[in-house]
Amino acid sequence: MWVFSTANVCSLFAATSIILRRCLSVGTTMAKSKFEYVRDFEADDTCLPHCWVVVRLDGRNFHRFAEKHNFVKPNDSRALQLMTKCAQTVMEELEDIVIAYGQSDEYSFVFRRKSNWFKRRASKFMTLVASQFASSYVFYWRDYFEDQPLLYPPGFDGRVVLYPSNQTLKDYLSWRQADCHINNLYNTVFWALIQQAGLTPVQAQQRLKGTLTADKNEILFSQFHINYNDEPHMYRKGTVLVWQKVDEVRAQEVRLPAEMEGEKMIVTRTRNRLVPLYCDLIGDAFWKEHPEILAEES
Ligand code: DGT
Ligand code: MG
Ligand code: MG
């Protein structure tokens, strides 16, 4: 005859549960190894070593987004400053970005040559920059557009480009700044012709057809008394974000011996802070002033 005591029943249950768990775990391991081959379908997108990795984001269909949100034409300082705030957040939250450059609805981020962040996987670089930037755009919107509600979620496309030398990286940034200059000069005259001279967009386009830089400067000056060089630097040059070392001095409460009670200790520490610059990137002066950006150990 079987006699079950409470203790017997408990140990029987415990033993059964251990066996069951073992069976399940062996089953899961087998299932996992059976399916694991699908990992081989993942493409290797490791960025080449020793290259500068650049991620460029661009607002998706911002022509429409700017219209719907009543951006000032041709430049809306709120929109440009919001872009820069998002870029600062990206640089603070992510690792290894040594410089960023932005204009219009785009921002470029340069990762240091020796970065090994996420084993240099291009998809990680691109998606982390794009998602951090887009969420920041929504998060900080109200700080810049107080009276303008955000009507729908904006999107940003991203791409990764590798530059093999310091010269190609400098030329890349010069290219983006030249693009800023050409577009901004065109837009400044285009909108002056519409807003101040009363032309239609088609007439303004016709008026500017075939004009060179000097012609546009001349129209601005003679017809609208605008000296293009007096336009805000942020509009003409775009925004460069770099890290700068700053000394922070602060008084700190510390536990001191009884005879010094109530005294404060002055603490100085050096911090890396992001600063926006509206300067020329095309000449050599910027790179001479900031040699640390291209330094091997940047
Ligand atoms: P995409 O990039 O192919 O999806 O199309 P869009 O429309 O974003 O074209 P894109 O990136 O070539 O041009 C940027 C647009 O963003 C351009 O139509 C003007 C607009 N935008 C950017 N910043 C400002 C601004 O400060 N004020 C105004 N009114 N519009 C701006
Ligand atoms: Mg765009
Ligand atoms: Mg664009």
Image: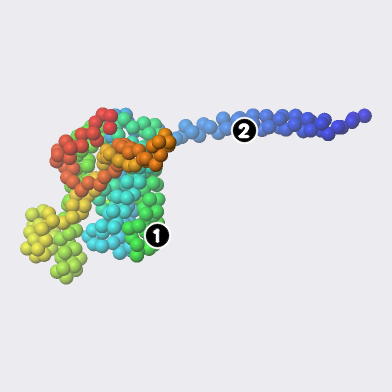
Q: Position of residue 214 (x, y in %)?
A: 8, 54
Q: How is the image coloured?
A: rainbow
Residue type at mark 1 is Tyr
Q: Residue at x 93, y 29 (%)?
A: 1
- SS type, badge 2: helix
Crowding at mark 1 (Cα within 10 Å: few <14, some 14-19, many 20+): few
Residue denoted by label 2: 28
Q: Position of residue 44 (x, y in %)?
A: 40, 33
Going by the image, does 204 lie left or right of 121?
left
The picture quadrant where one finds residue 112 is top left
Report how far apart the C-alphas of labels 1 and 2 lie in the structure.
44 Å
Q: Residue furthest bottom?
A: 198
Q: Position of residue 38 (x, y in %)?
A: 50, 34
Q: Residue furthest front?
A: 259
Q: Residue at x 49, y 33 (%)?
A: 39
Q: Nearer the viewer, residue 30 or 81?
A: 81
The reply to whether residue 95 is in sight is: yes
Q: Nearer the viewer, residue 29 or 223?
A: 223
Q: Nearer the viewer, residue 8 or 271?
A: 271
Badge 1 residue CB within 8 Å of ligand 1: no
Q: Residue at x 19, y 67 (%)?
A: 195
Q: Is residue 246 above or below residue 225?
A: above
Residue denoted by label 1: 152
